[in-house]
Amino acid sequence: MKKLPVLFCFLFLSLVVFSQQKPLQQLQQEFVDLRFGMFIHFNIPTFMSDDWADPDASPAIFNPVKLDCNQWATTAKEANMTYGCLTTKHHSGFCIWDTKTTDYNVMNSPFKRDVVKEYADAFRKQGLNVMLYYSILDTHHKLRPGHITPKHIEMVKAQLTELLTNYGEIKALIIDGWDAPWSRISYDQIPFEDIYNLIKSLQPNCLVMDLNAAKYPAQALFYTDIKSYEQGAGQHISKDSNTLPALSCLPINTAWFWKEDFPTTPVKDPKVLVNDNIIPFNNVYCNFILNAAPNRDGLIDDNAVAAFRQIGKLWKNEGPLAKLPQADAPIISSNIAKFKPANSSWSWDMQLMDFANDDNFTTGWESNKSVSKPWLEINLEKEQPFNMITITEKSNKNDIQTYRLEYLHNNKWETIFSGTKNDFIKVHRFDRVWGDKVRITIEGYKSSPTISEFGIYNERR
């Protein structure tokens, strides 16, 4: 029998993978339907006293001699969880898989075993979905503000390619240390759209979750497929009004990574975790992920295991949740309006036009109440292409009623939209145009219009 050329086989397999690509809303529904999973913080900080490890810590300290990922998976199963998510690389840059991108990895430790592989195999054996956590911030490799180079971007892409190529189907990737106030690595320095599209090219059905809820409003998906809330960082989902696919995370212990007092310190009450977290979150399209912190032997402590078992007795997974409401596609492109010169009609006191595109959703431009038809204009400084505009009001009362969006092309104002859109975050997608200025004219409003952020994007389609 004649053998097919290698290139043909590769292209055939690629077509098979992409032919199975699911619509994003279906993937989001599948994710929230999972309801409850296990976060697993296990990395070089496990062998130190701080969650943020010394970036120069020697790989020699990483040696979990009794590591048993089957124990982790069994514990998750007993809690009626449906998936796990492992910290492949935390903020100090140590990789717990067999990577070719850096020597700072588990294969150069005394352990010399691929923890990501053992974890993925163990969880799949129990019928559980596999997710991975990955930190963009990497203090060992100096991937931090003021030091980022093209080689850092290449490293991120290469590491994600390994993780999404060598370990089977990855249901979701939770990304951390990116566009956070404490990491200060922007979506422009490590380009979000590039990374997002790389992930989707490798695994089209892998959801991308960035832990970015602290910065962006809860009413739209900015730079994530799933809205994420880290409770310990003060990020709390509305148990009354949330309509987006969401994730809320919390450790069962007092910290994310294992500490010496964990075996003797009480863990969180299983009844509270069920009644105050799993049940109410599931009722508003939110999946709950509870962290386990394996110890330095590589095992979950007995007191934590007992609590997970108790959760499994108190709570049963009753299957799919209610159907998710229709939502706009995630915004993943760079905001070309950010920090560009702004102008406007008369503003109210110090709420000047410059606050409308300062990349800060807590500030905003407010029109003076005397102006009957307020306007705001962004100067892009040169003619360039764009195909999406977002308007986020500072008030959630939908004060802006009717308005007109225009762009300046060849010294002539062209209309993009004219009418009403009663959303707190107004997302407009349209065919690509070229212009050097964009403006909104507000023709009808309930009270003085306020805009916290005006975004302009050239989205890849």
Image: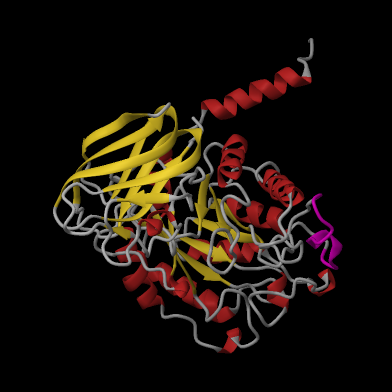
Image height of 26 relative to 225, above or below: above
Of residues 254 and 344, which is closer to you in this image? 344
Q: Residue at position x 26%, y 63% from top?
A: 348
Q: Position of residue 398 (x, y in %)?
A: 21, 53
User: In the rendering, at what x and y percent does residue 139 appear?
Assistant: 72, 66
Residue nearest the viewer, comparing 381 with 418: 381
Q: Quadrant of residue 363?
A: bottom left
Q: Residue at x 83, y 59 (%)?
A: 107
Specify whether 283 is left or right of 291. left
Q: Is residue 33 left or right of residue 103?
A: left
Residues rendered magenta in the picture: 100-111
The relative height of residue 314 versus residue 36 in the rendered view (above or below) is below
Question: Is 398 left or right of 165, judged from the image as shown?
Answer: left
Instruction: Mark yes or no: residue 314 visible.
Output: no
| Number of numbered discs | 0
Residue 193: image location, x then y, percent? 55, 42
Quadrant of residue 426 in the image? top left
Question: How has the structure been colored for display?
Answer: secondary structure
Q: Where residue 20 sits: x, y (%)? A: 51, 29
Q: Is residue 441 magenta?
A: no
Q: Is residue 291 above or below residue 205?
A: below
Q: Where 159 sits versus 459, above or below?
A: below
What residue lies at 44% left-to-right and 65% top-to-bottom? 214
Does the magenta portion include 109? yes
Q: Nearer the viewer, residue 106 or 327?
A: 327
Instruction: Locate the N terminus and report the quarter of the image it occupies.
Output: top right
